[in-house]
Image (tube, rainbow, N blue to C red):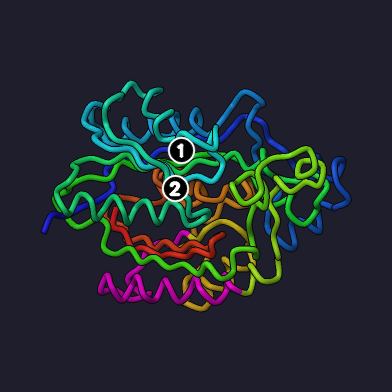
Amino acid sequence: MKKVGILGTGYYVPERIVTNADMEKIVDTTDEWIRTRTGITERRFAAADEFVSGMGAKAAEMAIKNAGIAREEIDLIITATITSDYSWPSAAVLIQDKLGLNGIPAFDISAACTGFVYALAISRDMIMAGSYKKILVIAAEKLSSIIDMKDRNTCVLLGDGAGAAVVGESLTDGILSAVLHADGSKVKVLYQPAGGSAMPATAESVAAGLHYLKMDGREVYKQAIEKMPLVLEEAMKKAGVNSGDIDFVIFHQANIRIISSIAEKFGWPDEKNIINIQRYGNTSAATIPIALAEAIENGRIKKGDMVALSAFGAGLTWGGAVIKI
């Protein structure tokens, strides 16, 4: 069987920094409330003329450069997003055009915060099957476009950004396992009610704020605390490793309490836990690849390190993976 690994990573975050102090001026909240409950001190919001395709293309450019390959070697693009530039066509085809790679296949997947892990699993299997050789995996979100700035329970949590990875054949196994799950019975725990065929846009739906993200925070917390450690255990077992073999862990950056609680459960000290939620907030599918690319860029994660990934998001979806850099 072919060996598959991550050949290069990249990320992009918008220039505009929105601090907790800024949020205090917009909605009834405080810096202390946000920090103590979420771990977030600031987040990035994209400019009015900045969209998922542009952010994704910038992260992709960096990933291709770091992979040390020509962009023409990319033979498939997979983009994980829930905030594409348009309802359709896909963000992937827009990114393909921006990269000058017209002709190669490109498609989106919608798995919310678990999107990168889903895309990683898909790309690994497609390369192992011999269908493609080098796949560009992108996770990008402009969540600022779907948040209700009057809802203090959600607007303070989210940010914008993009992460990317070039996945391809490698000399050693790099993606050791990828495990995916979903539970569609709990869709309304976290979703965007209007804008789809079930509730097309009308003046009434817009006025009612139904095009904004809606979340049952307590239930999301409960499900994440339960599902993320289970899928991590499953991913490590499938990879044939245990928690002691893991050099670093990257959780979906949604809440510092969730992250710290699960890391403690596995006995991972702070130095093994890659955390950037304090600077970027929750960027949905983009959190894990941004954290991975940034940690590789600053030398914290190095060649040969074993990294565990775990994510949970709307769908409900959850997934885990073990990769060796």
Q: Residue at x 38, y 74 (%)?
A: 243
Q: Secondary structure at mark 2?
A: helix
* Left or right of residue 143: residue 239: left
> Residue 238's quadrant in the figure?
bottom left
Q: Residue at x 49, y 63 (%)?
A: 317
Question: Residue 300, position in %: x, y?
Answer: 42, 50
- Residue furthest to the left in view is 1
Question: Residue 158, position in %: x, y?
Answer: 66, 48
Identify the mark at residue 292; answer none if there is no mark. Answer: none
Residue 282 or residue 201, whichever sits in front: 201
Question: Residue 180, position in %: x, y?
Answer: 39, 65
172 part of magenta stretch: no
Tell me which label, 1 or 2, sits earlier in the chain.
1
Which residues lie in the magenta part? 223-250
Q: Residue at x 55, y 77 (%)?
A: 226
- Main secondary structure along the magenta-highlighted residues: helix
Q: Secondary structure at mark 1?
A: strand
Question: Residue 207, position in %: x, y?
Answer: 82, 42
Q: Amino acid at mark 2?
A: Pro
Q: Which residue is mark 2?
A: 289
Can residue 186 be seen by looking at this rendering?
A: yes
Q: Which residue is mark 1?
A: 11
* Left or right of residue 155: residue 47: left
**Quarter in which the N terminus is drawn:** bottom left
- Whole-number angstrom distance, CA of label 1 to CA of label 2: 7 Å
For residue 73, above or below residue 211: above
* Left or right of residue 36: residue 66: left
> Residue 66's quadrant in the figure?
top left
233 part of magenta stretch: yes
Q: Are marks 1 and 2 in contact (CB under 8 Å)?
A: yes
Q: Amino acid at mark 1?
A: Tyr
